[in-house]
Image: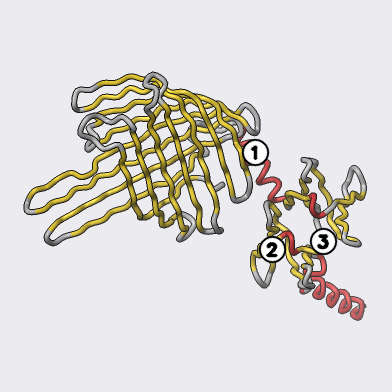
């Protein structure tokens, strides 16, 4: 009996000390092999948790074979969902399902792979997106930049920006604001060279996966331009032109009502058209470009137009803090007498991210 007991203990120790025999595996085209637990494939990389190397992300194009110990959830390019244990035979990925038996799948047709835990997390997130509370799902950024010179002349410039959004499967709420304060002092004479505030809110409602309608309200104050208040209310249609791992591009158009009050006493009310775009593009995994352009051709005052342009390049320093370089331009073809048509802004500083992750 003791011999059988010893043999059983030895087998048990071998089983415990060699979990990789029963673990998931990824075999690369160059012959390398990684063993661990497949977490997910979303985009152009598949992620596996290994004991020796931790979490590893591998280009999907470099994968030759995958083998799973436990069922994985696969989504194909045509939207079909398959769940089962995965193996690879003769270059074909085979999924052993409970309902349809063994199913052959082309590797190029697999768009998403999720473990059971990742699938549960994804479904919980989807359910939350369907019926969230008004204060849930907010995320956004806060920018701060400051410059100072001293000596024969003294200059100070402070820029601040905020952007927050709450996006669900049905709609999206966006809040945004930018402010700048700059002054120059020479020979004891102080002068305000820039003092402006831009802010607004926009609500988007999705008609389908590609199109949406929106309503917006924008408000501006610009002291050097003698603008006490510009209130612009509008709405229109938008189209989600690009949705990929690295690029998001929306184009939109509509009409607005513009009410302007200037410190000169001038007041103007006018109707305007609206065309524009909003772009987010990942240059690298840690560097992102964000850009927004809105052009307002005059309807009431034909031949006039306004244009707003903002662009930022953000480099992530960690999960929540980055360094931003921002340029902005505000153009008005018909400013009041004594004011320039163009206001240009350049700033750099820190960007803090808050709220949920994408």
Asked if the residues shown at circle 1 and circle 3 are in contact, with their CB atoms under 8 angstroms apart, the answer is no
Secondary structure of the residue carrying tag 3 is: strand
Classify residue 344 as left or right of residue 121.
left
x 25%, y 50%: residue: 157
Tell me the residue that label 2 is attached to: 58
Where does residue 6 sit, x and y in percent of width and height? 86, 79
How far apart are the alpha carbons under marks 1 and 3? 28 Å
Classify residue 137 as left or right of residue 20.
left
Earlier-in-chain disc, 3 versus 2: 2
Tell me the residue that label 1 is attached to: 126
How far apart are the alpha carbons under marks 1 and 2? 26 Å
Mark 1 vs mark 2: give the one in front.
2
Where does residue 109 sit, x and y in percent of width and height? 80, 49
Earlier-in-chain disc, 1 versus 3: 3
Position above or below: 81 against 41: above
How far apart are the alpha carbons under marks 3 and 2? 15 Å
Tell me the residue that label 3 is attached to: 67
Secondary structure of the residue carrying tag 1 is: helix
């Amino acid at each position: 009996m003791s011999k059988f007991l010893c043999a059983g203990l030895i087998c048990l120790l071998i089983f415990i000390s060699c979990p990789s025999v029963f673990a998931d595996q990824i075999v690369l085209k160059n012959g390398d092999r990684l063993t661990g637990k497949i977490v997910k494939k979303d985009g152009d990389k598949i992620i596996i948790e290994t004991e020796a190397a931790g979490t590893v992300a591998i280009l999907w194009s470099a994968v030759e074979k995958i083998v799973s110990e436990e069922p994985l959830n696969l989504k194909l390019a045509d939207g079909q969902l398959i769940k089962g244990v995965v193996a690879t035979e003769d270059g074909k990925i085979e999924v052993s399902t409970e309902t349809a038996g063994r199913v052959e799948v082309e590797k190029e047709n697999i768009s998403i792979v999720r473990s059971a835990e990742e699938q549960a997390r994804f479904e919980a997130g989807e359910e939350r997106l369907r019926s969230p509370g008004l204060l849930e799902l907010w995320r956004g950024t806060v920018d701060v930049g400051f410059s100072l010179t001293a000596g024969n002349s003294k200059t100070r410039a402070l820029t601040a920006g905020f952007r927050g959004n709450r996006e669900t499967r049905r709609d999206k709420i966006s809040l945004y604001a930018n402010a700048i304060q700059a002054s120059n002092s020479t020979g004891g004479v102080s002068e305000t060279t820039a003092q402006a505030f831009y802010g607004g809110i926009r609500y988007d409602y999705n008609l389908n996966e590609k199109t949406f309608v929106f309503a917006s309200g924008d408000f501006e104050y610009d002291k050097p331009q003698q603008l006490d208040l510009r209130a612009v209310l509008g709405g229109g249609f938008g189209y989600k032109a690009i949705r990929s791992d690295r690029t998001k591009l929306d184009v939109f158009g509509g009409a607005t009502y513009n009410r302007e009050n200037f410190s000169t006493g001038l007041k103007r009310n006018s109707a305007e058209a609206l065309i524009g775009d909003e772009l987010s593009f990942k240059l690298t995994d840690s560097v992102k470009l964000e850009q927004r352009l809105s052009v307002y051709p005059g309807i009431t005052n034909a031949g006039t137009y306004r244009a707003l342009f903002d662009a930022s390049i953000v480099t992530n320093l960690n999960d929540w803090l980055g360094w931003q370089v921002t340029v902005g331009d505000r153009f008005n073809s018909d400013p009041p007498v004594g004011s320039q048509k163009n206001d240009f802004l350049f700033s750099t500083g820190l960007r803090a991210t808050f709220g949920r992750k994408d």
